[in-house]
Image (cartoon, rainbow, N blue to C red):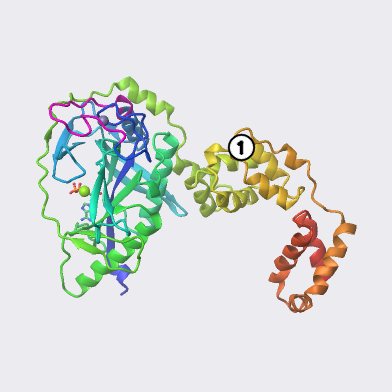
Amino acid sequence: MSEAATWEPVIGLEIHVQLKTETKMFCRCRNAYGDEPNANVCPVCLAFPGALPIANKRAIEECIKLGVALECAIAERAVFHRKNYFYPDLPKAYQISQYDEPLCAGGKLAVPTADGDIEIGITRAHLEEDAAKNIHVAESGRLDGATATLVDFNRGGTPLVEIVTEPDIHDAETAKRFLQLLRQTVVELGFSDAELDKGSMRFDINVSVRPAGSDELRTRTELKNMNSFNFAAKGIEREVARQIRIYEDGGTVDQETLHFDPGNEESAPSRSKEEAQDYRYFPEPDLVPVHPPAELVSRFREEIGELPGARIRRIADTLSFYDADVLVTGGLDRLWVALVDGGADPKEAANVLANQFVATGISPESVDAGELAKLVAARSAIPRAAFDEALGKVGEKGFSADPYLAQKAVSDVSELDPVIGRVIAANAAQAEQYRSGKTGLLGFFVGQVMKETGGKADPRVVNERVREKLG
Ligand code: ADP
Ligand code: MG
Ligand code: ZN
């Protein structure tokens, strides 16, 4: 029997998302990424004696709104707790977090797949504050080999939503897709950039395995502080395989925290045996309990539009499931709808967005969809060089497609034929190969003709003529 048939992975996720509120969670300091170190600090977030926290109303509302989007029950009474631990990036020696009375609990997020939805339970979503940032002074930027450690307190006190899932995930791919879908959801709600490379979204992944068919929960390990979807999937696969090997060899899995080095995929995880931490949670005496008003919750319920998962299912009626997934999790589907409404072929529109547009690195939100639609509709009528140049500028304020549409691609056969003739003559060997069945070389010839014409030829006409001349 294969391993996959005898063992079932069990995965639960804890995701942290920084909110981009104007100010921090419990003080009026500016909440901003990339400022001069220690520019945004005050007695509250530096934990001066006697300083008192005041909760950020906007952050509370955003956490509730996310909870509503995740179909959670919103608490009628939520409480902040102190979570005590000692670390240089935590000047109070406790983090204000939530414990047994979180703002949101008991929700779900459905992950659509080509074979239907996989429903993942959301245990809770609560609000807390981020810690400050330790900066290890060393070439590697890591603790190992550092000569000093500095602390930047700007990040200390940033509002953080923590989302915890039930151990409902049973493969790496679903974990990855859940994370992508959750990221897209918070980005669309508008209160986090959830940028993995800037640390505004990070996740811990709990992994165990069990005999297939059983519902026991065995000892889990935790992959800490991941910030890449692909790396998360790889880390899960590797950890599942490791645990299976241990059980098959008659061993036991230790509860521990594992750190994968994103720069070195091949390296074994480093381990830190964690003592069972006792955080001595107790209610934060300096903050009053939160009572989310019922009107607010129902207003949020009405305000939340069609979520990414539902849009994937809808678009998958027209495109393949894969294409629908790429468009929605990439935040591209609003543009896709505009392109299709503008007359573009659905599949072609998806390709332009998922390949050419994504390669520009332009944020989809910055694009005037109407102008992009005009441009794509004219794609084969204008020179390719003009199209590429315009595509690189669609994110600019006030971008207009019109000047590019005025340029016409050369589709005049009498102009193109001589060029095509020259290209074929100059590449006789390839022409021979093409004729003997290597038709994949068509693109090579079209590319050469495009190059010869400075990108001005109409690729459709070139395609047709080259095929004819070679055929
Ligand atoms: P803690 O508070 O110590 O972090 P929790 O029990 O709240 O622990 O669980 C944290 C995460 O671990 C949740 O996402 C949960 O689904 C997951 N989890 C719990 N038990 C297991 C297990 N046996 N295997 C995999 N994941 C688990
Ligand atoms: Mg945990
Ligand atoms: Zn402050």
Residue 344 in sight here:
no
Instruction: Answer with left or right where residue 378 lies relative to residue 309.
Output: right
Question: Which quarter of the figure is the C terminus placed in?
Answer: bottom right
Q: Is residue 285 magenta?
A: no
From this viewpoint, which residue is outermost toward the front?
A: 147
Q: Is residue 40 magenta?
A: yes
Quadrant assignment, res 51: top left
Q: Amino acid at mark 1?
A: Ala
Residue 432 in sight here:
yes
Q: Position of residue 371 (x, y in %)?
A: 66, 37
Question: Which quarter of the figure is the N terminus placed in?
Answer: bottom left
Which residues make up the magenta segment?
A: 39-60
Q: Residue at x 67, y 47 (%)?
A: 389
Dot 1: few (<14), some (14–19), or many (≥20) neighbours within 10 Å?
many
Quadrant assignment, res 344: top right
Q: Secondary structure at mark 1?
A: helix
Q: Position of residue 290 (x, y in %)?
A: 22, 25
Q: Residue at x 23, y 23 (%)?
A: 291
State whether label 1 is within 8 Å of ligand 1.
Answer: no
Q: Position of residue 252 (x, y in %)?
A: 15, 67
Residue carrying label 1? 369
Q: Position of residue 89 (x, y in %)?
A: 21, 44
449 over 428 or under it: above or below: above
Instruction: Answer with left or right where residue 280 lies relative to residue 142.
Output: left
From this viewpoint, which residue is outermost toward the right?
A: 414
Q: Main secondary structure of the magenta part?
A: loop
420 over 430 or under it: above or below: above
Instruction: Answer with left or right where residue 303 lies relative to residue 57.
Output: right
Q: Residue at x 12, y 43 (%)?
A: 279
Instruction: Answer with left or right where residue 427 lies relative to residue 212.
Output: right
